[in-house]
Each structure stands twice: as C-alpha cells, then as structure tokens.
Amino acid sequence: MPTFRDFKLPDLGEGLTEGEILKWFVEPGDEVKLNQPIVEVETAKAAVEIPSPYAGVVSALHHAEGETVDVGSPIITFDVDPSGEPVEPPPPTSAAPGQTRVAAAADMVPQVPHEPGLVGSPAPKADSEEKIEVLVGTGPKSGKLTRRPRKAAEAAPRSPQPARVSAAGVGARAAQVAGAAQVHVLAKPPVRKLARDLGVDLRSLSGTGPNGTITRSDVEAAAGDTGGELASVASEAPVRVVDFDPATREQRIPIKGVRKQMGAAMVSSAFSAPHVTIFTTLDVTPMMEMVERLKTMREFAEVRVSPLLVVAKALLVAVKRHPLMNATWDDAAQEIVVKDYINLGIAAATPRGLLVPNIKDAGSLTLPELAAELQQLVTTARDGKTPPADMQGGTITITNVGVFGMDTGTPIINPGESAILCFGAVRDMPWVHEGQIAVRKVTQLGLSFDHRLVDGQLGSQFLADIGAMLADPALFLAWS
C-alpha cells in the first residue's frame, strides 16, 4: 500500500523562522532519488538548494514558487512505496485509512553537526507528542505552524491595469514561463533568478558564455527586447521589484530575505554597540610590489593574488598581537569573550544583497591557503551559493570599498563582533618619500570598533600595526 511522507521546511540557518520558495526542481508525478535537489529556498541568510531525504515519487507540492513558508510547515509529500496501489495522497497533516504516514520527526532532513567555533547548536526535540526536528539553529516558531498569510495585493491575480505597469513589462510571459515544461539550460543561480524577476524564458536564449552558458548580459538583452523598462535597474541593483506606478513615479521593492536580515542586523548593531571609527593614510607601495612578486611564485599559480590578500594577512597577524580585538561582548553573562580562533569575515556585494561569509580559523592558514579560501569565498558568494554555515560565527570582518573606487568609510560592525576594517582604493598620489616628493601608491584604512571592548589606545595600536605591515612587509616575518 502507498506510504506517504511529508517533508517539512527545515531551519536552514541559525534560528531562522521562514523561507521563500524560489524554484521547484520537481513536480507531482516525478520520480526522485535520495539527495536529489528538489527545491531552492531563500532565507534571510542565503539561497539554498534542498536535497530530497527520500527516494520515491512526488505526490504533492504544498506551496507555489514565490510563497513564504514557516519553518516546520510541510512543503512536499512523497510516496516512498510507488509500487503500491495508487490512491490520492491525504492532506499533509493527516493520514487516510489504509495508508501509512510517518511521524513528523522523520519528515525533516537529518541534522548537520556544527563546525568548531560556530554559534548555535542543533535544536533539541520538543517534549510534545508531535516532535519536530530542524536542520540547525534554535528551531521553528513555537505554537501552531502555519504559512504566513499573503497580503491581499500578493494574493490577488496580477492583471494589466491602466494606471500600473508590470516591473518587467512581461507579466503574462512570466506566467507562461512558470507553467511551462522544464528544459535544461546552462545558467548560474543568480542569472536564473534575474531571468525570473524579468520574466525571461531561459530556454529561448542562446548563451554567449563558455560552453553556451547563459550570462547576465544575455538575460538583460532579452528583457530589453521585450520592453523590459526596468532592465537597467536590474543591472544596477538586481532586486525583486513588484511594480512601477507612473502616477507617483515610484516602485516598491519587498523587504525580504537577505536584505531584510541585513537591515535588522545593522540597526541592532548600530544601536547596541557604541561605534568609534578611526582612520590612517599610508604609503603601500611596498605592499603593491609584494603583490606583484607573489603573482610570479608557483605557490600562487592557481589562485588570485590581490591587495586584499595582504591586508587580510596583516589583520590576522595584528589580531594575534592584540587578542582583545577578536572578542565579543556577552551582555547576558556580563563577560567579554576573547576567542582563540579567527573566523575572518569578508563583506561581499552580491545580486541578493550584502553577505558576510567568513573563513573559518583563518589565522591557522598559510598565505597560499588563505588566498585559495578568499577566492572560493568570493566566487561562491557571487554565484549565490553561500551556505548559511559560512555566514555564522564570524569574529572580525574586512570590507573592501576600494573595489568601488571609494577611499574609506565608517562601516557598521557585524553583529557579535568587536571590529570591522575598511580597506579603501589604492591610488597614485604625491607623497614625501625619503625627504622628496614622489608619486607613490597610497591608501586609507578605517577601523570601526565596539568602544565597550576596545578603547582608543588599543584600536589605534591595532590599526597602526596593520598599516605598518602594509608599508613594510618585512614586519610580517618579525611579528608572525
């Protein structure tokens, strides 16, 4: 007889309570294998492809793409005994006579052990009749688990109206794309998301990337050909736009996912930790010469060597000289927690918003290993594949505003950390060198720190040490 098993949305991060269904990779009637990707879900921390915990046949999808679902709510039902007599699958919360339905505890994906140094731990089982397990974090919301009610504007069918224009100008086409049969195309997740936002059918495009891969420019060009009046907006700030009202000349963008989490975290940090920012301007000509020298070494042949690599190494060395910079303020315990490991966060601007993944135990890595980890971190973030675990447990962060041509800034400390280093653009500037004015490579560093943990003297010494190593790389040997 058929055996139906529900799969509930797990907690994909540290205490997350909901997620948005971005893309289903399966539909009712499809046969799936164990660990086959079945759905892409966006949470406040990352977009994650969830594998199937069962092998069998998909009986029902309980939520459509674009819906926001509470952690612990069923999202899909499987028939793990498809050879049995076919019957209609029961609702996800009950079992029909003659059919077998497993307990809710078995409907969740297996728990994932935490890495050393990560904050949080797997949630314990609830002491209730229906036990619910989650992937990682503090667990789902207490009480009855229901899907968040959709706003009336979201629930109502989208139809052309005289006073309003669809954001992508292709609403009808987007609906056709969503319901059409899936055809495999080569495109990275951020490109697929952009195509969904603009209503572009990837199957209709010829990719100009390697091996026919569809690129971002391919999608934007197709959107422009179909009257995509917001294509330029998508290229500058690729976020989901609801619609544009010509009467008010306003467009409304939902606050959700990474952007929502980022906003809440920054507000919390700005108003809970007293920020102080200090600056230094220095001649980094020796650092730039060092970067060029490293590029010629065989140890770095397979990785990208950039000034950020040297700045990151200098910060790691400086932290070992000043351990209190790598600490957190535990208000509940009234303790300062000084950490012996350094999980180095790198602020990354991605199509989904600002992410701060971190390199675990970065202080133990050699320079080539650090270069490889940096390269992998940035590539994964830009591809939209950063797992939630990579964004948990950071201890200190670098933000590189120099890539945008900025000289410096006053960055907000990442929640739970004590400091963030801002690395500005490296410019050719006149500088007094050995008593003469010469054109040198000059940059600015800014350091924001939590004044509860770090006083002005410690913060100044820490920043001065980083600057000294960039100006004279020989200090790396003396201080390492």
Image (cartoon, grey):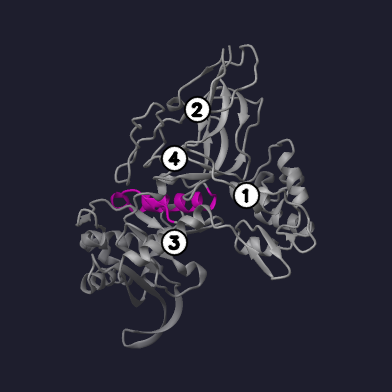
Q: Which residue matches tag 3? A: 306
Residue neighbourhood size for the residue with mark 1, other residues' Cα within 10 Å, grouped as few (<14), some (14–19), many (≥20): many
Of residue 25 and residue 72, the one placed in the foreground of this image is 72
- Label 4 vs label 3, nearer the camera: 4
Badge 3 element: loop
x and y, in percent, of residue 205 in the image: 75, 47
Residue 479 located left or right of residue 124: left
Residue 53 — which label? 2
Specify the amino acid type for callout 1.
Answer: Lys
Q: Is residue 229 above or below residue 432?
A: above
Quarter location, residue 331: bottom left
State the quadrant of the C terminus. Answer: bottom left
x and y, in percent, of residue 28 in the image: 66, 28
Whole-angstrom CA distance, mark 4 to mark 2, is 15 Å
Whole-angstrom CA distance, mark 4 to mark 3, is 36 Å
Specify the amino acid type for callout 4.
Answer: Asp
Whole-angstrom CA distance, mark 4 to mark 1, is 22 Å
Residue 193 — which label? 1
User: Is there CB contact under 8 Å for labels 4 and 1?
Assistant: no
User: Is there CB contact under 8 Å for labels 4 and 3?
Assistant: no
User: Is residue 377 on the magenta stretch?
Assistant: yes
Question: Which one is earlier in the sequence, the residue at label 3 or at label 2?
Answer: 2
Q: Which residue matches tag 4? A: 11
User: Is residue 142 on the magenta stretch?
Assistant: no
Which range of residues does the magenta coloring cover? 356-384
Whole-angstrom CA distance, mark 2 to mark 1, is 25 Å
